[in-house]
Every structure is written in C-alpha cells, then in structure tokens.
Image (tube, rainbow, N blue to C red):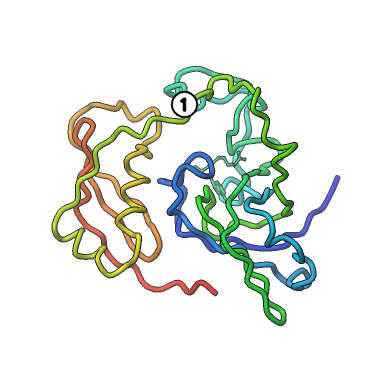
Amino acid sequence: MFTFEKIGIIHSCFREKFGIPRQPGLVPEARAILELLPPYNRPEAVRGLEDFSHIWVSFVFHACLGDEWKPTVRPPRLGGNRRLGVFATRSTHRPNPIGLSAIELEKVEVGPGKVLLHLKGVDLLDGTPVLDIKPYLPYSDCISAATGGFAAEAPATSLEVRFSQDALDCCAAVPQLEALIRRILSQDPRPAYYGKGNGKRDFGMKLLDYDVQWEMNGDVVLVNAIIPIGEKSIP
Ligand code: SAH
C-alpha cells in the first residue's frame, strides 16, 4: 500500500473528458498550465527544467476514480469491437488509474511561491492531479526502432471542419480558438461505438470558457455555435 500526494494540478483548456485528444501532441494548440502546489511550489524544485523541450508528467485519471477496471478493454483505435489486455493499452480504466504523458514544455514561470509550467499539446482534463514530473531524455526515451502494436500509425485526421458565420464571429475574439477547434474535431472525438457514417447528429464539448456545438453529417463537421459558459481563471 502506498499513499501519494499530488504535487501539482493541471489547468487545461479541456473542461470535460469528451473531446480530449487520445494522446499528447495530437492537438498542438491544446494548452495547459501545470501549477505546483505547496509545499512543492518552490522555484528551486524545477531548476534546470527550462532546458528541456519535453517532460514526462504522471498523473491521476481523477475523473475515473471509483470506476471499475476489467482485464480486457476495447481500444477506440480498433473500432471498439476488439478486446485487448488492459496492460496492452493506454486505457484510462486501470487497476491503478495513473496516466503518463510526454508533453512539450513551452515555458517555466517562477516567482516567490509560484511555479507554473506552460504546456502544449496536452491530453489532460482540467483539474487533473499531478503525481510527478521528469525531464524527457531523447537519447534514451526516443526509441526509433520501436514497434507500435495496434496503434503503429498516428490516428487519421481526415474530417472536414466547417464553421457557421456565428461560430466564426465568436472565434474572432479568442486567439487560436478556431485552430484549436478545427484540430480537435478533424480527429473525430466520437467514441468508437457511435456508428460512424450514420445520419446527422449533434454533439457538444466544453472547451476553455465555451460550449462548442457541432453537427456531423458523414465526414463533414459543421460547428454551429460557440457559447460562453462563464469564467474560470487560470493563474
Ligand atoms: N497519455 C496518457 C493518457 C492517455 S488516455 C496515458 O497514456 O496514460 C487519454 C484520455 O484520458 C483522454 O482522451 C481523456 O479523455 C482522458 N483523461 C485525461 N485526463 C483525465 C483525467 N484527469 N481523468 C480521467 N480521464 C482523463
């Protein structure tokens, strides 16, 4: 039995699980801030980290706590209809719900009692508790001869994303919001069991301070509305 205390918390653009990319780096526009919490919020604890372009972040899948785990799961990449061992996948439903992501570190911001790591291309939910941070070491961690099992290739990004004029007008005020939405939706966040290709359907996700609403018709995504949902301050 071990007890771990979180060392930090993630403030992310993703305010719900639906729509979060399935791995880091797939949506470079997806930003987050990792805030170290007391008593770990000491600038000297990250001294030298700014020289690394990427970090490993281990974290708790806190939105899955209490969910059951099963020895086999159905990875979305296999269309949701083939079962593999949980330890052969990156499923969030594991005996110990610990996640691991290699994430681009854009900037280290420190001050008295303040350590903020600015992250890019995250696959993390807002509020995610962080267990540990380590530098990514290319000489050892980047294994060019590695094979990728059922996920050998990056997922397809083939959907065409269109915006209504209303939705475009909402994006105009927020830098990169349109690019962020385009990248997320082109990767088709629908769960594998959604009978893709069926008739028109409506979807929504909470992103930053907006409720993003879109419809899908075949391989075309139409963003209908982007509605503000109140403020959340990022430190
Ligand atoms: N790179 C990590 C995560 C892969 S699973 C790993 O391999 O361990 C990625 C999915 O985790 C995302 O699509 C999102 O739906 C989910 N997720 C991200 N943060 C989460 C959290 N705090 N709690 C539960 N699920 C989370």
In this rendering, the count of numbered labels is: 1
Expressed as whole percent of the image width and height from the top left, the position of residue 39 reads: 78, 72
Which quarter shows the N terminus? top right
Residue displayed at 73% across by 72% down: 41
Whether residue 152 is situated above or below residue 104 in the rendered picture = above
Q: Nearer the viewer, residue 11 or 82?
A: 11
Q: Which residue is mark 1?
A: 77
Residue displayed at 77% across by 59% down: 5
**In the image: residue 148, left or right of residue 56:** left
Whether residue 228 is situated above or below residue 206 in the rendered picture = below
Expressed as whole percent of the image width and height from the top left, the position of residue 141 reads: 71, 37
**Image quadrant where residue 167 sits:** bottom left
Expressed as whole percent of the image width and height from the top left, the position of residue 229 reads: 34, 67
**In the image: residue 76, left or right of residue 104:** left
Q: Residues within 10 Å of mark 1 (few under 14, many from 20)?
A: some
Q: Nearer the viewer, residue 47 or 122?
A: 47
Residue displayed at 68% across by 30% down: 143
Give the farthest residue toward the left: 165
Amino acid at dot 1: Arg
Expressed as whole percent of the image width and height from the top left, the position of residue 135 reads: 72, 51
Whether residue 49 is situated above or below residue 72 in the rendered picture = below
Whether residue 58 is situated above or below residue 233 in the rendered picture = above
Residue displayed at 54% across by 63% down: 11
Which quarter shows the C terminus? bottom right
Give the farthest residue toward the bottom: 112
Q: Nearer the viewer, residue 63 or 213?
A: 213
Give the farthest residue toward the top: 82
